[in-house]
Image (spheres, coloured by chain):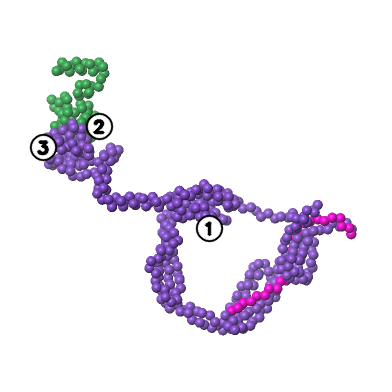
Chain colours: A green, B purple
């Protein structure tokens, strides 16, 4: 599996293809500390006012903060607003 | 902002979800392509907004994740329409209101004229009424361009006209031409003739040949100053010259006047009964349902019209307040002196009219007689006034002009 992924990585790097699509990586856009847009996610694992955990292709992303709120959720992206303190990848 | 408007038009529901794993519910919904936003976690429930289209698919998600959800609120245009379908009279009312406003706005409600100083406003308005522009006319039926053209051709004093429609008020802006200075014609040959039967009091001529002398008796139409001059060389007439006769001829004119004054008259005595009446005026049509009982003698007094204004706009609906004062008629008699005084003041008014017209009273005598129920005053006045009247030569004569 990791061998296949290695080839895939090399091919995308050589051909300059968008990595998030080819390697199934989440594309995270962070706007200050008040809004975060995560594209290419897998699902919401935990949802609370202080902690949100979102499953992505490379592991669970833990967002900590105050007054967190899912502003919008569609099949492709999730938008979270609030005041963030940390973003941690849990492997 | 734009997204919100879009959501509002498509309609959305606010639901509250209760269950063991709301996250799974959200994930499942997101994967199904249901558009969810504004997810808020409260103590034991989660509220979220779901698009109307997505809500239909949500039942399955709830079943799978064993989450129960409840609609808190429905928002958006589809629900408003639904509500309107149920309440047909209400919807009909709104529709009717819009229709009435539209229909009323197709009429012209007020017509005003501005910029005119010499042409009376009434003349312009009455002309426009003939052409189909008046308060109450349909806006799309009036051809403004045509009326503008007709106004200019009909009123020679107008140099420019604009008809502006602002809502339901029409303003006719007029620009008048500059007034022509009066042109004194000194070339057309004329003569002066007598305007009245009289005795010549004075005559002064600056151009032309005088034909009368002081104290001559003239009849109306007599030639006073002739514009035809004979050119003489010694005793021989060698030709004729026509000039404009200029001169002032004053004559003594006798006027006779009579005043008839009744010795008895009817006086109104108010009883003190006052009745008030209100009536509605809709575009100068009187609508009055409740009229006071007006048996006997009543006089209309203190008429007041109240207009309703909104800015510059005057509504065509007015309220008229009228008071009726009851009275009794009583016959009364005047003494001869009172009647005479009354007659003399009336006479004096006639005299003043003469003086006002440029006459000078040099003699007056008043005679008084009583005849039946009337006192008759007869006055004889001798007035000195201008009696000349200019007339042009007829064409045949002027043709002989050198």
Q: Which residues lie in the magenta part?
A: B235-261
Label 3: chain? B
Labelled disc at residue B66: 3
Q: Where is mark 2, residue-wise?
A: A31
What type of secondary structure mainly makes up the magenta span? strand
Q: Quadrant of residue B78?
A: top left
Q: Is residue B294 left or right of residue B67?
A: right
Q: Secondary structure at mark 1?
A: helix
x then y, percent, for residue A66: 18, 37
Q: Quadrant of residue B57?
A: top left
Label 1: chain? B
Q: Secondary structure at mark 3?
A: loop
Marks 2/1: CA distance? 71 Å
Crowdedness near tag 3: few (<14), some (14–19) or many (≥20) residues, C-alpha within 10 Å: some
Q: Where is mark 1, residue-wise?
A: B122
Q: Is residue B351 left or right of residue B284?
A: right
Residue at screen point 15% across, 43% down = B70
Marks 1/3: CA distance? 83 Å
x then y, percent, for residue B185: 71, 55
The one of B363 and A31 positioned closer to us in this rendering = B363
Marks 2/3: CA distance? 35 Å
């Amino acid at each position: 599996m990791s061998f296949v992924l290695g080839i895939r990585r090399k091919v995308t790097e050589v051909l300059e293809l968008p990595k998030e699509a080819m390697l199934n990586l989440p594309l995270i856009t962070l706007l200050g500390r008040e809004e975060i847009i995560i594209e290419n996610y897998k699902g919401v694992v935990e949802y609370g006012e202080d902690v949100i955990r979102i499953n992505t292709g490379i592991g669970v992303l833990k967002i900590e903060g105050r007054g967190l709120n899912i502003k919008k959720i569609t099949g492709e992206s999730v938008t979270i607003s609030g005041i963030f303190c940390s973003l941690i990848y849990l492997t | 902002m734009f997204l919100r408007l879009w959501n509002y038009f498509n309609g959305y529901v606010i639901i509250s979800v209760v269950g063991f794993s709301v996250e799974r519910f959200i994930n499942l919904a997101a994967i199904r392509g249901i558009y969810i936003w504004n997810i808020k976690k409260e103590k034991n429930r989660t509220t979220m907004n779901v698009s109307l289209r997505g809500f239909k698919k949500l039942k399955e998600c709830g079943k799978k994740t064993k989450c129960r959800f409840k609609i808190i609120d429905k928002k958006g245009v589809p629900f408003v329409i639904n509500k309107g379908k149920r309440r047909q009279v209400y919807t009909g009312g709104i529709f009717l209101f819009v229709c009435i406003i539209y229909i009323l706005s197709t009429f012209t409600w007020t017509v005003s004229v501005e910029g005119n100083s010499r042409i009376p406003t009434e003349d312009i308005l009455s002309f426009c009424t003939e052409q189909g522009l008046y308060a109450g006319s349909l806006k799309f039926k009036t051809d403004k361009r045509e009326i503008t053209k007709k106004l200019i051709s009909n009123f020679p004093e107008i140099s420019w006209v604009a008809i502006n429609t602002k809502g339901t008020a029409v303003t006719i802006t007029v620009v008048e031409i500059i007034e022509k200075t009066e042109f004194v014609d000194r070339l057309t040959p004329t003569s002066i003739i007598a305007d009245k039967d009289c005795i010549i009091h004075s005559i002064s001529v600056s151009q032309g040949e005088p034909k009368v002398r002081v104290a001559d008796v003239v009849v109306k139409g007599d030639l006073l100053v002739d514009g035809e001059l004979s050119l003489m060389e010694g005793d021989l007439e060698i030709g004729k010259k026509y000039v404009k006769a200029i001169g002032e001829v004053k004559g003594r004119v006798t006027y006779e006047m009579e005043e008839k004054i009744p010795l008895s008259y009817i006086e109104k005595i108010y009883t003190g009964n006052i009745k008030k009446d209100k009536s509605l005026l809709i575009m100068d049509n009187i609508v009055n349902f409740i009229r006071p009982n007006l048996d006997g003698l009543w006089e209309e007094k203190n008429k007041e019209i109240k207009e309703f204004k909104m800015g510059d706009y005057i509504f065509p609906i007015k309220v008229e307040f009228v008071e009726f004062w009851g009275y009794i008629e009583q016959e009364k008699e005047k003494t001869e002196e009172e009647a005479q005084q009354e007659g003399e003041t009336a006479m004096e008014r006639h005299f003043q009219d003469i003086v006002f017209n440029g006459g000078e009273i040099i003699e007056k005598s008043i005679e008084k007689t009583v005849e039946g129920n009337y006192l008759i005053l007869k006055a004889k006045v001798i007035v000195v006034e201008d009696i000349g009247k200019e007339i042009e030569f007829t064409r045949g004569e002027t043709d002989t002009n050198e």
